[in-house]
Amino acid sequence: MTTPNTNVELQAIISASNNLVTPPPYIANFDFGNPTLGATSYFQEPYFQATTGGVAVALPASPVFFILIQNLHASAILRVTVTPTGQAASASTYGPGGVVIFFDPLETGGGFTALTLTGLVSTVPAFVMVGA
């Protein structure tokens, strides 16, 4: 979907704590500072079906500078394969509830030209959002 003047803002705070003691002390706390990507197009599919043969995500532009994927399956593993601009494809796997985010708000890192999702044992539903 092409939508001029779309902003994609990353709002996140990551905190790690030691749950073996009470109260748990914080080990790390990082605020991302809400970086914003001035996007011109994006694609969103809340229940993308990643089959065992792999399914390419239709990118709204090439390259994209924002990728968000969450594995929505209760037990299956999802393989995410991304192709950085001018480089070889690279794959990683995520278990149930796993989340991967690629976010380059200044668009200086080259971006990604391809994205493929594969369910390793069965079809895996995933939340997918990409933007350029």
Image (cartoon, helix red, strand yellow):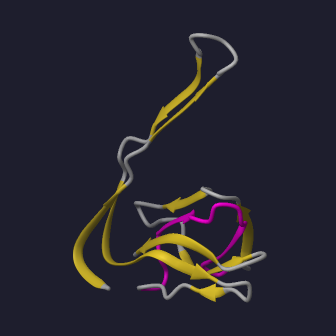
Task: Determine if the magenta segment contains residue 39.
Answer: no
Q: Position of residue 31 (x, y in %)?
A: 44, 36
Say left or right for 13 vs 54: left
Q: Quadrant of the C terminus?
A: bottom left
The spot of residue 63 in percent (x, y) is 49, 80
**Residue at horizontal 52%, vertical 79%?**
48
Residue reaching furthest to the top: 22
- Give the magenta-colored segment's residue range: 61-86
Q: Looking at the image, which residue sits at the far front?
A: 74
129 relative position to 72: left or right: left
Magenta highlight on residue 67: yes
Front position in the image: 78 or 61? 78
Is 81 left, or right, of 110 in this rendering?
right
Which image quadrant for residue 50?
A: bottom right
Q: Residue at x 42, y 85 (%)?
A: 61
Quadrant (top left/top right/bottom left/bottom right) for the N terminus: bottom left
Whether residue 12 is situated above or below residue 15 in the rendered picture? below
Instruction: Report the front residue among 48 and 14.
Output: 48
Taking the view exactly as shown, the residue that stands out farthest to the right is 121
Front residue of 27/75: it is 75
* Residue in front for this viewpoint, 97 or 55: 97
Residue pictured at 56% horizontal, 76% vertical: 112
Say above or below: 91 vs 75. Answer: below
Residue 95 position (above or below residue 31)? below
Total marks shown come to 0
Q: Residue at x 70, y 61 (%)?
A: 75
Q: Position of residue 130 (x, y in %)?
A: 45, 73
Q: What percent of the width, then of the height, locates residue 62?
A: 48, 85
